Amino acid sequence: MNKLKNIGERIKQARLKIGFSQEELASKVGFASRSSVSKIEKGDQDIPRLKLIEIAKALNISASQLLDTEEVIPTTNIDSHMHYFLDASISAGYPLTVDSVSNLPTVSIPDIFLGKYAKNKHILIMRVNEDSMNKIIQNGSYIAVKTNIDVLSVSNGDIVVTNVEGADNGYTIKHIYKDDTNNRVILRPNSTNPIHTDIIISSAESQRLYIVGKVVAYNVLL
């Protein structure tokens, strides 16, 4: 039995021990439906570390017990807040509007990760599924995106999540530069992969560019 199946089985046994249905556990940890719990228990879905902590808390056990290792993961005395979460598996085609974000599942994020943005209700957690910024933010990292930004307040060099109409790569993360001299916006990668190049949006094409928000925090994978 692989690691995911082992963890999934422990979650199932802990859930049954306290009498939770899959629907009840899904509701307590912010999943949109029981199907996510079902996939996790079968070992068919990876579990982000932060979500594992949240599941453990809901089941009144430690995350270390679910992992069945000596690794100690703190589950108490950590201030946290709920934030909307967009899974990488659906990010390429998900229409991110104010209404659609409010329909996303939520995840509990420790305040220490978000710092001054910990209580901000406009923070969206996303998982990176590309390598266009891998010199700074690696593929698979989690990012916190402040979504209610004024585009005019974005500074050159800021990292933003954008969607360009007509592009085939869905949402992308880039440095943004406003080239006022030439009336254009430049979305610039910072990647070891040469396939990623500047995306240039002229003022006449500005309606093609949708800025989801500004990246205000991200985790580093070692």
Image: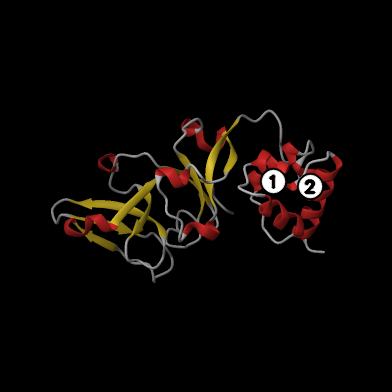
Point out the residue furthest to the right here. 17
Q: Residue at x 64, y 49 (%)?
A: 33
Local SS, label 2: helix
Can you name the residue that lies furthest to the left here?
181
> Which element is circle 1 on?
helix
Drawn side of residue 149 relative to residue 70, left or right? left
- In this rendering, is residue 1 above or below 116? below
Residue 197: image quadrant is bottom left
Which residue corresponds to mark 1? Answer: 52
Q: Label 1 sits on what residue type?
A: Leu
State yes or no: discs 1 and 2 in contact (Cβ < 8 Å).
yes
Q: Is residue 166 visible?
A: yes
Q: Mark 2 is on which residue type?
A: Leu
Residue at 61% x, 29% y: name it: 79
Q: Position of residue 166 (x, y in %)?
A: 32, 66
Label 2 environment density (alpha carbons within 10 Å; few <14, some 14–19, many ≥20): some
In the displayed structure, does residue 126 sit left or right of residue 132? right
Is residue 139 something one can see in this rendering?
Answer: no
**Relative height, residue 97 to residue 163 (above, below):** above
For this rendering, which residue is in front, 2 or 39?
Answer: 39
Residue in view at x 32 percent, y 49 percent = 157
Quadrant that contains the N terminus: bottom right
Q: CA distance from mark 1 to mark 2?
A: 8 Å
- Tell whether 174 sits left or right of 50: left
Q: Is residue 192 above or below residue 65?
A: below
* Residue 201 percent location from the top left of the image: 24, 60
Q: Quadrant of the C terminus?
A: bottom right
Which residue is disc 2 drawn over? Answer: 66
Q: Which comes sooner in the sequence, label 1 or label 2?
A: 1
Q: How is the image coloured?
A: secondary structure
